[in-house]
């Protein structure tokens, strides 16, 4: 399955990069978030590949949900797809945007791929562990290596949202004694923790399950964790008959390897 996720993400990424280079036309959705033809084309590619390979597994995808197509997830096993995470970065010509594909089983992200096509890097993880792939021209695999979270250093490094930072985030970092942090867009924040480049990612404010599932899967596969306000692991697929609000996450904190 992870190989199919990888192939789908790379194919979608190629279409995204074509639009990126040409310059996207931007529309505003009902929730006031931006969308481009790249989001829609990438989602169509991914949905086509996943539904052909796994016709019995429901697919929850951002743009389909925005259009009112939200399948029931009561089986406990479904895909979560964000075809273009970091649309604001994409529009502003930053390279911090990603393709996100994840499998959810009984509320847990058990496999996921995060692909940053402008950077030529792909992160993926499942029960076998996590790895980072370098992707060259034409989707060619250049290199791959295993990644893992690091032991939290005396002076931990945080990652925070480039487009959605908040006073609550800064207050939390101050409380935790974290004074070094990097502003990064999209689900790449999870990936920096997964590969041991950062230690903590606090997020206070609205996110959707498709924003986080793939990155969360990679972090968990790399030995980290993502927890909600109650300290329990962030969960996915909240109702059998979902509405848009059911796919909204609670506030969360993603950790690498925490101090004992």
Image (cartoon, rainbow, N blue to C red):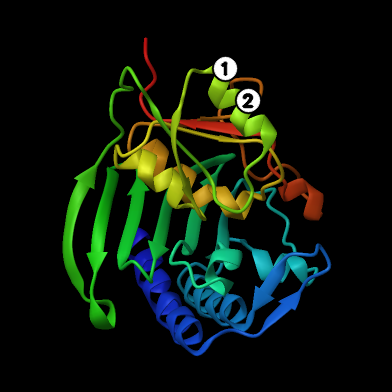
Whether residue 242 is visible here, answered yes or no, is no
Q: Residue at x 55, y 21 (%)?
A: 174
Quarter holding the N terminus is: bottom left
Left or right placement of residue 189 versus residue 230 in this view:
left
Residue 187 lies, with reference to residue 64, above or below; the image says above
Crowdedness near tag 2: few (<14), some (14–19) or many (≥20) residues, C-alpha within 10 Å: few
Q: Residue at x 31, y 39 (%)?
A: 197
Measured as percent of width and height from the top left, residue 104 is found at: 54, 48
Residue 220 lies, with reference to residue 19, above or below; the image says above
Quarter holding the C terminus is: top left
Q: Which mark is residue 157?
A: none
The residue where tag 2 is placed is 171
Whether label 1 touches label 2, CB < 8 Å? yes
Measured as percent of width and height from the top left, residue 99 is found at: 47, 65
Residue 13 lies, with reference to residue 165, above or below; the image says below
Q: Which mark is residue 175?
A: 1
Left or right placement of residue 139 versus residue 12 in this view:
left
Left or right placement of residue 122 versus residue 58 in this view:
left
Measured as percent of width and height from the top left, residue 28 is found at: 77, 73
Q: Residue furthest bottom?
A: 22
Q: Residue at x 70, y 70 (%)?
A: 34
The span from disc 1 to disc 2 (Cα, nearest Å) is 6 Å
Q: Secondary structure at mark 1?
A: helix
Measured as percent of width and height from the top left, residue 206 is found at: 71, 45
């Amino acid at each position: 399955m992870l190989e199919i996720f990888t192939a789908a993400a790379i194919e979608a990424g190629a279409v995204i990069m074509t639009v990126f280079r040409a310059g996207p036309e931007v529309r505003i959705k009902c929730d006031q978030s931006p969308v481009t033809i790249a989001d829609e084309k990438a989602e169509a590619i991914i949905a086509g590949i996943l539904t052909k390979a796994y016709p019995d597994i429901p697919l929850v995808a951002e743009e389909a949900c925005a259009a009112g197509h939200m399948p029931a997830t009561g089986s406990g096993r479904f895909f979560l797809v964000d075809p273009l995470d970091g649309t604001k970065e994409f529009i502003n010509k930053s390279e911090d945007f990603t393709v996100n594909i994840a499998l959810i089983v009984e509320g847990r992200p058990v496999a996921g791929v995060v692909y940053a096509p402008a950077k030529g890097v792909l992160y993926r993880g499942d029960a076998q562990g996590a790895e980072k792939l370098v992707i060259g021209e034409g989707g060619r695999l250049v290199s791959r290596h295993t990644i893992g979270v690091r032991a939290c250093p005396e002076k931990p490094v945080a990652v925070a949202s480039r487009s959605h930072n908040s006073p609550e985030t800064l207050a939390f970092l101050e409380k935790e004694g974290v004074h070094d942090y990097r502003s990064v867009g999209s689900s790449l924040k999870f990936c920096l923790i997964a590969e041991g480049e950062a230690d903590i990612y606090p997020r206070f404010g609205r996110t959707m399950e498709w924003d986080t599932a793939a990155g969360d899967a990679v972090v968990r596969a790399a030995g980290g964790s993502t927890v909600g306000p109650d300290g329990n692991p962030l969960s996915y697929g909240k109702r059998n008959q979902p509405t848009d609000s059911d796919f909204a996450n609670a506030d969360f904190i993603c950790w690498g390897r925490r101090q004992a």
